[in-house]
Image (tube, rainbow, N blue to C red):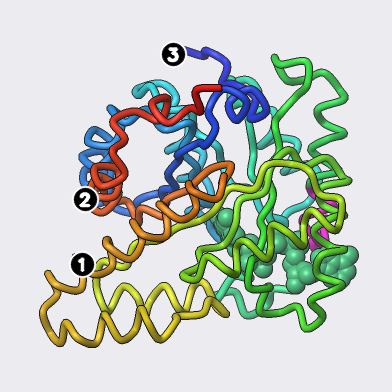
Amino acid sequence: MDLVSGMHIADILAARHPSFSFVFFPPKTTEAAGKLFESIAQLEPYAPAFVSVTYGAGGSTREMTHDLVLRLKTTTSLDPIPHLTCVCHQEAEVVDILERYAAAGVGNILALGGDPPRDLKSYNKAEDAFQHAADLVAFIKKFNDSGAHPDKRGFGIGVAGFPEGHPTTPNRVLEMDHLKAKVDAGADYICTQLFFDNHDFFDFRERCQLAGIKIPIIAGIMPITSASGMRRMAELAAGARYPAKLLRAIQRCGNDEDAVQKVGIHYATEQCHDLLDHGVDGIHFYTLNKSHATREIYASLGIRDSAAVRPQS
Ligand SMILES: Cc1cc2nc3c(=O)[nH]c(=O)nc-3n(C[C@H](O)[C@H](O)[C@H](O)COP(=O)(O)OP(=O)(O)OC[C@H]3O[C@@H](n4cnc5c(N)ncnc54)[C@H](O)[C@@H]3O)c2cc1C
């Protein structure tokens, strides 16, 4: 097995400004895995700065994250960043996960609070070793200091940001304090929840500056590819606003799913142009394990390779 060490996120983002990256979720069936790796084969030539892999709320899907990360690492040129959450975890389990990733040369981790498991009625958050993502970040930082990772800095650490606010946080001022706590605990970058109005992102970025947050902020973009997919995602990314401009454009398509996809891709492309014009640190595409929309956006942005958009300076 090739255990070449992944790059630390600080090095990745220093070399790629703006960075382009993708997120995948672990497939649950062999057929879904086949389709994902078809998408990966189509996306790999674009040389994303990194790809991240989501983490389930519990049970066997969690091992699938590890398996997909290892498969990406050993059979592709992609640099995978696993997501890790606080949900249903004790310290010893997290140490085990970190040791396995460190041994496999995984360079970075996205540390999250995590969605509560929908099917585990007995779930009691108070029993988790880490109550908030900031605690998990601090724990990974401690692991880093132990020298168990091949990079002497240890894992690069990412955290989540919510440009429109997190749906369970009623106090938007306090919310920035919580984000700052994650950064102060040792986060190296922020990756945002998807959003459809760039003003929310730009305002979030400004509020981060005001809070003294200086790490790179990567914008999460999800092209809508079907009306049903939009509804599903609205459920998963609870609280995300769907602006009237976008909904009107989708409504105009009626039952024409092909038209919905074109409108969704066009809308996301415009968002990306605007983000790039305003000096975004990076764009993270929520691919839903498909490649078409991302490839269309890349083509419209005129990007063949992420390195091609490096500022000339
Ligand atoms: C880019 C991205 C990727 C994601 N990937 C996954 C994934 O793979 N798997 C998954 O299960 N979920 C994932 N999520 C969802 C995320 O885990 C949930 O939305 C979660 O509820 C919030 O995560 P967090 O890391 O911000 O948690 P936290 O920072 O722990 O925040 C959770 C809530 O607690 C509040 N809070 C934080 N600190 C304190 C404190 N000290 N005192 C009181 N309240 C506090 C926050 O304001 C917020 O309301 C992802 C989200 C994003 C944006």
> Disc 3 on helix, strand or loop?
loop
Q: Which residue is mark 1?
A: 261
**Dot in front, 2 or 3:** 2
Please give the name of the residue rendered at 26% of the width and 79% of the height, measured from the top-left corner.
227
Residue 301 - label: none
Spatial CA distance of label 2 from label 3 is: 31 Å
Q: Quadrant of residue 187?
A: top right
Q: Which residue is mark 3?
A: 1
The percent coordinates of residue 134 (x first, y second) are 82, 53
Q: Is residue 149 left or right of residue 9?
A: right
Kind of residue indicated by mark 2: His
How many C-alpha atoms fall within 10 Å of the one at disc 1: few (<14), some, or many (≥20)? many
Please give the name of the residue rendered at 42% of the width and 44% of the height, measured from the top-left corner.
22
N-terminal label among 1 and 2: 1
> Disc 1 on helix, strand or loop?
helix
Q: Which residue is mark 2?
A: 292
Q: Quadrant of residue 304?
A: top left
Task: Give the vertical position of 97 relative to 173 (above or below).
Answer: above
Task: Give the vertical position of 218 relative to 107 (above or below).
Answer: below
| Range of magenta residues | 128-136
Contact, mark 1 vs mark 2 (Cβ under 8 Å): yes
**Dot in front, 3 or 1:** 1
